[in-house]
Image (cartoon, helix red, strand yellow):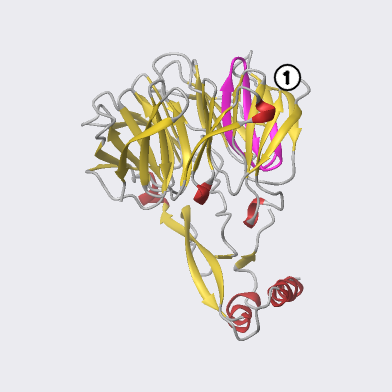
Amino acid sequence: MLFAIGLAFMSCNEDDGSSSGEDIEYIVATPLMMSQEDFRNSVTILPPQAIDESGKIYAYKNYIFVNDKYQGVHVIDNSDPAAPKKITFIKIAGNVDISIKDDYLYADSIMDLIVLDISDINAITEVKRLENVLQQYVAWPVEADIFDWEGNAGANDVQIGWKTESVFMTEEEYADKYLYRGGDVLLETASTSDSGGDTGQGGSLARFKIVDDFLYAVDSHYINIFEISDLENPLDLEDVYAGFDIETIFHRDQNLFLGSMRGMYIYDISSPDKPVFVSEFEHGTACDPVVVDGDYAYVTLRGGNNCGATESGLFIIDISDITNPQLKTSYAMDSPYGLGIKDEKLFVCDGESGLKVYDKTDVENLVSLNHFTDINTFDVIPLDENLLMVGDQVLYQYKYLDNNIELISTLDLK
């Protein structure tokens, strides 16, 4: 089967005009591994560090938390938005998401849930580790062509992430090194604010969401539910199976909106410990987050690579009948990631195509207000006074204007 896949793959490359002697760029992903002992003792509070790969952002009080994918969280003092300052780094192996309530920070560490006391930001302490309460799931890097496992895993090791790199080789070198080895590689895999208490705000790419006394954490298939009325001692409740390839979570009123590679799932949390399926909106396979405002859900779909064959775009879905969501309209995008809403402004992070700002008063006729080009955009959080946006190792902050936004600061995270 691998041989057949390889022949088809090489055939496609030849159709694109590449000859057998040409070097072709492949993105190779290798797993990052750690011994279980080191993993369980990995939480460390360090001085400010250079970021490796900027991930999701989270805002709480006068602080901004920027995820360093699979490595931990950078803490930024944003008392003066015109001059933000990095103040510390919370090293957490395998971390991707956080959520905060009343000075307690909840963070994933692969299959474990970590609780940190951040009441003194200069003396952060770990107060609880719940072991094996999350699915041991590390998202596949969608840009990868080859997943190489050879020699990377010990019997008791934990995978905490992926390392990707560009490798140039001919088709013959590719076949010799990967295709015929068998077993060790996978070839092109098929694949708004929190509420209750003093909580923070995550972006549209978040997988954690606090609603009152409950923390919801989604993985590829489940809603993991924790009761956090005792902030130091979360109770792990029964998970709810929610679908396939779930990537993001958004809360509005009594509903959770889950963005997946296959569509948007809506769950009722009137009984917060037992989310109940309400409805779904299906689309072609693509990577997508979702945000909700009024009668509409806004979903960005990112096609290409292993996100799927769907062309990239912004879908606006009518949810006035929550039991029967319907597509209202759609707009072409290049490679969108996170998005956000502030009053009548819609912000879309369109990858390398920059930050796009629209007036959404008439959803069937979005009006472009601004387009910040020459920046690589990833995730965005519309706060009351300012807009936060993280791109390629840079934190941007914008001030709202009547019909526009204006850049007020940038912070190089490297």
Relative to 259, 42 lies left or right: left
Range drawn in magenta: 243-264
Task: Give the x, y percent position of residue 267.
Answer: 67, 23
Residue at image location 60% in from the left, 19% down from the top: 273
Q: Quadrant of residue 35?
A: bottom left
Query: Taking 171 as reference, is 92 above or below it?
Result: above
Residue 105 in view in this figure = no
- Could you tell me the amino acid type at mark 1? Ile
Relative to 159, 7 lies left or right: right
Relative to 239, 117 lies left or right: left
Q: Quadrant of the N terminus?
A: bottom right
Relative to 180, 140 lies left or right: left
Task: Give the x, y percent position of residue 166.
Answer: 49, 68
Residue nearest the viewer, comparing 60 with 293 = 293
Query: Taking 336 as reference, is 147 above or below it?
Result: below
Q: Quadrant of residue 136?
A: top right
Q: Which residue is mark 1?
A: 322
Residue nearest the viewer, comparing 22 with 138 = 22
Residue at image location 56% in from the left, 58% down from the top: 143
Task: Give the x, y percent position of residue 269.
Answer: 63, 17
Residue at image location 70% in from the left, 78% down from the top: 14
